[in-house]
Image (cartoon, helix red, strand yellow):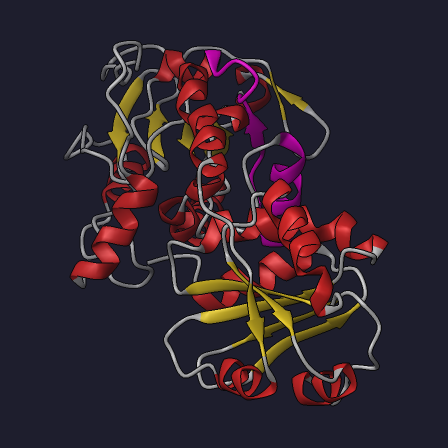
Amino acid sequence: MKPLALITLLVFCVPETLHASDPVPLAIGAAAPDFSLPGTDGKTYTLKNFAQYKFLMVVFTCNHCPTAQAYEDRIKQLAADYNPKGVGVVAISPNDPQAIRLDELGYTDLSDTFEEMKIRARDKQFNFPYLYDGETSAVSKLYGPQATPHVFIFDAKRTLRYTGRIDDKEKPGTATVHDTRQALDALVAGKPVPVEKTKTFGCSIKWPDKRDFANQAAGEWAKEKVTIDELNSEQLQALLKNEGTNYKLINVWATWCGPCVAEFPEFVNMNRMYRNREFELVTISLDDINRKPNALNFLTKKQASTKNYIFNGDKYAFIEALDKNWEGSLPYTLFIAPGGKIIYGKQGVIDALALKKVIVEQIGRVY
């Protein structure tokens, strides 16, 4: 892994502090704690719902974590391969959504609310139940996952026989040691599990007592400086060439534009989510130049500590230069790749989730 990539990963995946209340993993030989949790399919699940399976694999995972996303297809494949062999698979999200900062969402379009879990389960067509424990994390604390993902495998008596990682490499297609498969193969064959416990690697669990850490973000962002600079036609051309390494999201707006004002907080959120990666948000006001103080006042209220411009020149020339497909109404949004290729162009109000999906598919869900 390149040093820069490792540093970026640590921003999103290393626990922010060590909490004394963080639980320890369930011990080998322990009984599976029962639960009653809602699933994304509208059903409520308990251990009894998996009674028909000789073995049960419980995996703690989530939406937002890049490591968790890297393993989603492997979890699906495990369910497909071992369900016919008597292995039930269930996934539980242990994370409290209120304990997650926006800048922890740099690899995703979704956070970990129950409604967003439903979207992820649908998008990925999960072939296993996906349960929500984020309201209290009470069930998860009984199991003691240390990171997402974390696997617990139980035998017919629902005694823990394996706990730990899925395999030894996060990047899809690079694993050489398949610990979870080895454990399942041994159990199905009636043999002892060769390695009963391994360490896990991934994003820290967002327990409810970490809400204070998430809440600190609001104060930090409120202190960031907000500025606005004038932009001329030549500078606009340089901006559109995008010769740097960042993808640029450009939002064209005005203070008198109701839809612009209404959707603007979504762009502020996206900036906070993705700015630690190869991403930059640029806003361009089309207010009259004499209303520059008004535009700055609006940006300050919205805590838009990004690169903000107000265009100083002929607006029709601006429209033609920005995108020949743009008819001229506000708001207007462009997403541009390094080198200047337009990936996304939208006249009118954006669909924030759809745009975030475009962004994260370009900058990457995994590291």
For residue 78, side relative to residue 341 (left or right): left
Q: Quadrant of residue 259?
A: bottom right
Check the image and report above or below for 168 versus 1.
Answer: above
Q: How many marks?
A: 0
* Residue toward you, 101 or 254: 254
* Image position of 6 with respect to 346: above or below: above
Quadrant location, the C terminus:
bottom left
Pick out the residue farthest to the front.
290
Residue 98 percent coordinates (x, y): 53, 25
Residue in view at x 22 percent, y 60 percent = 4
Whether residue 54 is situated above or below residue 347 in the rendered picture: above
Residue 344 is situated, as x and y percent measured from the top left of the image, at 64, 74
Is residue 13 found left or right of 53 in the rendered image?
A: left
Q: Is residue 366 among what the camera can see?
A: yes
Q: Residue at x 46, y 29 (%)?
A: 219
Residue 54 seen by the camera: no
Residue 282 coordinates in the image, percent (x, y): 55, 65
Viewer-closest of 227 and 194: 227
Q: Is residue 190 above or below residue 157?
A: below
Residue 115 lies in the magenta stretch: yes
Region of the chain picked out in magenta, as a range: 114-138
Q: Quadrant of the N terminus?
A: bottom left
Residue at (75% x, 65% y) in the render: 287
Query: At 56% from the left edge and 52% from the top edge, which residue is drawn?
Result: 270
Where does residue 207 sit, x and y in percent of width and height? 41, 20
